[in-house]
Image: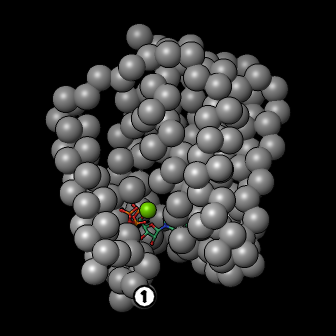
Amino acid sequence: IWDESERLQNLIQDLLDLSKIEHSEFQLNWQRVDLSMLTDDVIVMLKGKAKQKDISLTKVTEGSSTIEGDPLRIKQVMINLINNAIMYTPQGGRININVTETNEKVIFGVKDTGIGISKQEVSRVFERFYRVDRARSRNSGGTGLGLAIVKHIVEAHQGEIIVDSEVGKGTLFAICFNKKAQL
Ligand code: ATP
Ligand code: MG
């Protein structure tokens, strides 16, 4: 019962959040954000969950990882992507997080050794309520809002998100953030 009520609370929170985001009723709180340090906070938060499934969670940072963005919103993006990686990766898998500096951007990537997403479905995972294989994922607790929220937050930052996945092998979600806000 407690599990159910927690799920319901999370669902309501996500729905409220998404409707605010979709109606542009949210303003980003622009600040300097160190993506590598923010990742560390999220890893501390989620490492217990990964450990329960014996999944390793590692991070590699290359170069400077400071951008301009909204730290709370970016943290929400990181939590959603890493939660997905844990949820859709079987026991004993690996999750590698990369924070990589390029000329004008910093790329945040989450790569897992999970179940993967087929070519037909990969374009749909950002739709609200869309879940691959509903029957099988019914038990895994999600509602299909996580990536819709991620996409809106990334777009508000004028960033880009890409997915590369292979069924049975794993999935990479990567976000390119501009170092400087394009206001
Ligand atoms: P929640 O709203 O709790 O996040 P969810 O995880 O089902 O629920 P999304 O995060 O939006 O929803 O993801 C949508 C669907 O995309 C998932 O149901 C799953 O089928 C697929 N998916 C997302 N991330 C991965 C991943 N790392 N590996 C495999 N499939 C994934
Ligand atoms: Mg999710």
Please state the quadrant of the image where ligand 1 appears: bottom left
Q: Residue furthest front?
A: 2
The foreground one among 134 and 45 is 45
Q: How many labels were placed on the picture?
A: 1
In this orientation, does residue 164 appear? no
Q: Position of residue 52 (x, y in %)?
A: 64, 75
Indicate left or right for 143 with 37 as reference.
left
Can you say whether 19 is above or below 64 in the image?
Answer: below
Q: Position of residue 120 (x, y in %)?
A: 46, 71
Q: What residue is pinned by disc 1?
A: 136
Badge 1 crowding class, 10 Å Cα cut-off, few under 14, some 14 to 19, many 20 or more, is few
Q: Tell me the residue at 50%/39% (across/down).
A: 75
Q: Tell me the residue at 73%/20% (across/down).
A: 103
Q: Tell me the residue at 31%/66% (across/down).
A: 6
The foreground one among 25 and 133 is 25
Q: Position of residue 102 (x, y in %)?
A: 74, 26
Label 1 near ligand 1 (CB < 8 Å): no
Indicate left or right for 22 with 28 as reference.
left
Can you say whether 134 is above or below 11 in the image?
Answer: below
What quarter of the picture does the C terminus occupy? top left
In this orientation, does residue 89 appear? yes
Q: Quadrant of residue 76?
A: top left
Q: Residue furthest top?
A: 183
The foreground one among 42 and 166 is 42
Q: Position of residue 64 (x, y in %)?
A: 76, 22
Element assignment for label 1: helix
Indicate left or right for 113 with 15 as reference.
right
What quarter of the picture does the N terminus occupy? bottom left
Q: Tell me the residue at 72%/75% (across/down).
A: 54
Q: Give the residue type that dot 1 points to.
A: Arg
Q: Residue furthest bottom?
A: 135
Q: Quadrant of residue 88?
A: bottom right
